[in-house]
Amino acid sequence: MSVSPESFKKTSFISLARIGVIASHTFTQLVRMKVFYFLIAFVILLWGAKQVIFQNETGGDTSPEQELRLIKSTGFAAMNMFSMLLALSATALLIPKDIEDRTLYTILCKPVPRLDYLLGKLLGVLALIFVSLVAMDLVLCFFLDQKYSEIIDIQTLTYTRQGMPQDMIEAKLANINAHGVSINIHLASFAIFLKAIVIASIALLISTFSTSTLFTLILTLIIIVIGLIQSDAREYADTMAKFGVENQLSKISLMVAVFFPDLQFLSIEDGVIDGHAVPLSIMGRITILSLFYLAIYVILSWFTFRKKEF
Amino acid sequence: MNHSSNHALDAPFAIEIKDLVKTYRSSFKKETFKAVDKVSINIKAGEVYGLIGPNGSGKSTTMKALLGLISPTSGLCKVFGCDSTKVDARSEIGFLPENPYFYKHQTSSETLKFYGNLCGMRGKYLNNKVNELLELTSLTHARNRRLGGYSKGMLQRVGLAQALIQNPKLLILDEPTAGVDPIGSREIRDLIFRLKEEGVTIFLCSHLLEQVQEVCDRVGIIFEGQMVNEGTLDELTAIENQHEVILENADEGLLESISELVRQHSSSGAKIVSSQTPRSSLEKLFIDTANNRKNKKS
Ligand SMILES: Nc1ncnc2c1ncn2[C@@H]1O[C@H](COP(=O)(O)OP(=O)(O)O)[C@@H](O)[C@H]1O
Ligand SMILES: [Mg+2]
């Protein structure tokens, strides 16, 4: 058989199967790096938070909610920190490691388009974060629900002893109810995942042009910090404008928002800790915004990675 | 597949490198540096071609250009007529990089499956291929061990197996025997012979000359990025007017009469250049010892 160009199998530009292969490989790689061990730490942390009982000297009934809030805020803070750390380090480490170990040579020498490689790596990291967040969300809900039942039992007992009428007891308990397990907890967890998506895709972009892991880590961290404080800066500028102080800050911060994602905007867990329900419109908005950032960063990553030489 | 010679003639070249130039800019000075300088190589389908040259002469760079890992500064590279900057060109190439490292967390069978999957292979067909290749590279006994614990030679064999996973028509081997013990490098050599019989085109490079000698149909010598010599091994190395005779159990008398015979022909210019007891090469000694051990064991 003579070999002619026509005999080549056409390699499709994007193949979900191929991306899946790389993603599941990345997932396994991370799992075998024993990242799931932090779950133990998470369980211990929340168990500790659950043991805390606020002494209440006045006999007022604010403390039961405080105890529930503490569990939630501890849980969300840990989830935030863990998912950010993982999104940052896993993405920033994996590609430079592939280049250094030359494993990338062997992958790109198979008929694998470079975009597929990038998407596979990113999806692998995100899948791991997703699974961890689901696990943490369940752990959080478990401890929250336990604490909630305990509090309800104790409070009902106290109020009954105080001789409070039934309808008043119910009204008081409804207050606590808002701090119990609800769909809002899951929505807040999902918003944390959205933040991780944005951070991972920034780290992906930086690792495609950076030549060192440390540089990638530091630059991504700087962008995260900018992302976290820019809304405060904007608020400050608005306040100044109200006082008639002319400044460029608001314009600058708008420009900043185009290139650096506003991570504060993506955070909804504070409201959930306060016991508020999350409106679906906000969920929709932050989902679309995150996916928008994801798309931009992936396209930029592909742009720099497409012609990269090894 | 039919690799008969008349077909090979009308087939395009398996590898076509034309005036390849690759310059690197050194990061401190402004000056550029030519890692590969106007190299042209044509390799026919089914041929085994060896590129030899000292370290840093541009062998790996040439191969990377052929694989689309770097883009040529000028010139072009084609694989079976397909421009090597295109992804499609890679479907028929198996590549063994210099000092291959794979994912340490995977076992060798997982590694091969992973690369097979990347080539779009699935299921039973892939499983059979993986088993076959593990057998071929004598890694079956270690198939469920993680690569983190593999020796250099074993990794090299994983690299070879990985390169062969999708039955490529072209094999590109960067220093296939570097850092491998003599027995391992012999096995790799035998494997290359076998693949050659199956009609696979092989492009390999090495800085160790002896290893290339026996396997290559044609050899190119590259030096500081430039191709300085090219031809069949015979053309390049034969000393046409000499002949080597090695005798066994010859006594003094026989040797004396041979010298006498040569002296009688001295009018035609014949003479003995050297006469000595040949030494067993260290490599041969190594292999013999190992074989003796193995025979004793079994
Ligand atoms: N990415 C790079 N940047 C700068 N110089 C490089 C790069 N890659 C290779 N070189 C240089 O190109 C030359 C050829 O390298 P290489 O092809 O790896 O040689 P070898 O024949 O040993 O495989 C070397 O001098 C090397 O330093
Ligand atoms: Mg080299």
Image (tube, coloured by chain):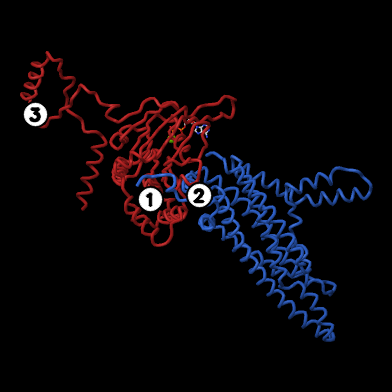
- Please say if A266 is above or below A241: below
- Chain letter corresponding to the colour red: B
Task: Tell me the tag on residue A112.
Answer: 2
The residue marked by circle 2 belongs to what chain?
A: A
Q: Residue at x 82, y 82 (%)?
A: A169
- Judged left or right of residue A86, residue A24 is left
Is residue B297 in sight in this rendering?
Answer: yes
User: Which of the two discs, 3 and 1, labels the residue nearer the N terminus?
Assistant: 1
Tell me, yes or no, whether dots 1 and 2 are on the same chain.
Answer: no
Q: Residue at x 80, y 52 (%)?
A: A231
- Judged left or right of residue B209, residue B296 is left
Task: Tell me the tag on residue B250.
Answer: 3
Q: Nearer the viewer, residue A262 or A161?
A: A262
The residue marked by circle 3 belongs to what chain?
A: B
- Chain letter corresponding to the colour blue: A
- Three-letter amino acid code of the residue under disc 1: Asn
In the picture of the structure, the residue carrying the numbered disc 1 is B167
Residue situated furthest top in the rendering = B267
Location of residue B142 (image quadrant): bottom left
CA–CA distance in space, label 2 to label 3: 63 Å
